[in-house]
Image (spheres, rainbow, N blue to C red):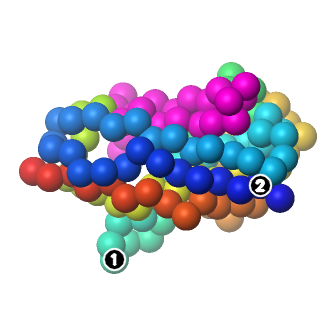
């Protein structure tokens, strides 16, 4: 089993930046494809970004493309989400997720594909 802990959330003004971290423990981190999702109040969970096991393949939702960047450091068992040019509509709880996979180059954009989830970190963007 993998334990995931998000950090780095907070309150920021529109146009500002944050970097979220997702620290993993329990199993070999590099065996897992990873993803970021978010859920705003009253809305369904939505895909933000995903990264393959070795980090060579990434994907981002259209709503964040060009502003957010997903990355990972397998030596540190940590995944990141760099968020720039934040907008009030980015306000949500951000969750990281892990999927056990044999594929080193595949990314996954559906939450139902993931095996483990963190507890989430709140990001609030003020206008």
Q: Is residue 66 magenta?
A: yes
Q: Which mark is residue 74?
A: none
What residue is disc 1 on? 42
| Residue bearing the label numbered 2 | 2
- Tell me the mark number nearer the camera, choosing from 2 and 1: 2
Q: Specify the segment rendered in magenta.
A: 62-83
Q: Is residue 72 left or right of residue 52?
A: left
Residue 56: horizontal and vertical position, in percent?
68, 22
Question: How many labels were placed on the picture?
Answer: 2
Specify the quadrant that holds the N terminus: bottom right
Which quadrant of the structure image shows residue 14? Answer: top left
Can residue 109 be seen in the rendering of this structure? no
> Left or right of 87: which side holds 106?
right
58 to 102, vertically: above or below: above
Residue 102 lies, in percent from the top left, at 90, 40
Tell me the SS state at disc 2. loop
At a point 37% along the width and 59% down the height, the residue shown is 122
């Amino acid at each position: 089993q993998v334990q995931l802990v998000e950090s780095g959330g907070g309150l920021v003004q529109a146009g500002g930046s944050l970097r979220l971290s997702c620290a993993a423990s329990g199993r070999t981190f590099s065996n897992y494809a990873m993803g970021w999702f978010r859920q705003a109040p009253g809305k369904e969970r939505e895909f933000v970004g995903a990264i393959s096991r070795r980090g060579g393949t990434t994907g981002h939702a259209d709503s964040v493309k060009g502003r957010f960047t997903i990355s990972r450091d397998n030596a540190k068992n940590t995944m990141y989400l760099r968020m720039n040019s934040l907008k009030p509509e980015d306000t949500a709880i951000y969750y990281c997720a892990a999927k056990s996979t044999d594929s080193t180059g595949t990314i996954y954009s559906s939450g139902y594909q993931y095996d483990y989830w963190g507890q989430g970190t709140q990001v609030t963007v003020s206008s």
